[in-house]
Amino acid sequence: MTGSHSKLHSTPLSGYERELLAFAVRWVPYGGGDEFILPHFGISPSLFYRRVLAVLRPGRDHRLSPEEQRRLADFCQRKIHKLSE
């Protein structure tokens, strides 16, 4: 399957999903911005990172490069692990 073919069959993100992703991408260089997640989204940081991972799953039109996607997914997994300790 070529990149253009898979793009034709990708599921677009909702406005909420785009907002989750934009927040995550913006705050990753600063450690995630956990203190702003509850006031902004009304959910715990752990749930936030789980939802971002769901947005990054295959077949979603998140428009990140494979490297950006991998970096963000790794960051979210590390945060979930750290928050569950």
Image (tube, rainbow, N blue to C red):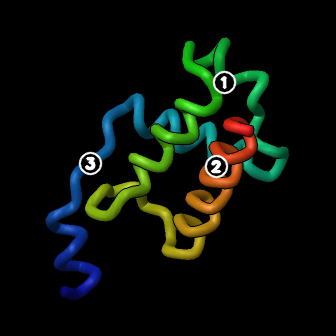
Q: Quadrant of residue 84?
A: top right
| Image mark for residue 1 | none
Residue at which label 1 appears: 37
Q: Position of residue 13 (x, y in %)?
A: 32, 43
Q: Are marks 1 and 2 in contact (CB under 8 Å)?
A: no
Q: Who's the residue at 32% across and 64% down the image? A: 58
- Looking at this view, name the residue that lies furthest to the bottom: 2
Instruction: Tell me the distance, in whole angstroms, between the alpha carbons under discs 1 and 2.
Output: 13 Å
Instruction: Tell me the distance, in whole angstroms, between the alpha carbons under discs 3 and 1.
Output: 23 Å
Badge 1 amino acid: Ile
Badge 3 amino acid: Pro
Q: Who's the residue at 26% across and 62% down the image? A: 59
* Disc 3 residue crowd, few under 14, some 14–19, many 20+, Cα 10 Å: some
User: Which-is-in-front pick, marks 1 and 2?
Assistant: 1
Q: Who's the residue at 52% across and 43% down the image? A: 21
Q: Is residue 52 above or below residue 14?
A: below
Question: Tag 3's secondary structure?
Answer: loop
Q: Who's the residue at 22% across and 52% down the image? A: 11
User: Which-is-in-front pick, marks 3 and 1?
Assistant: 1
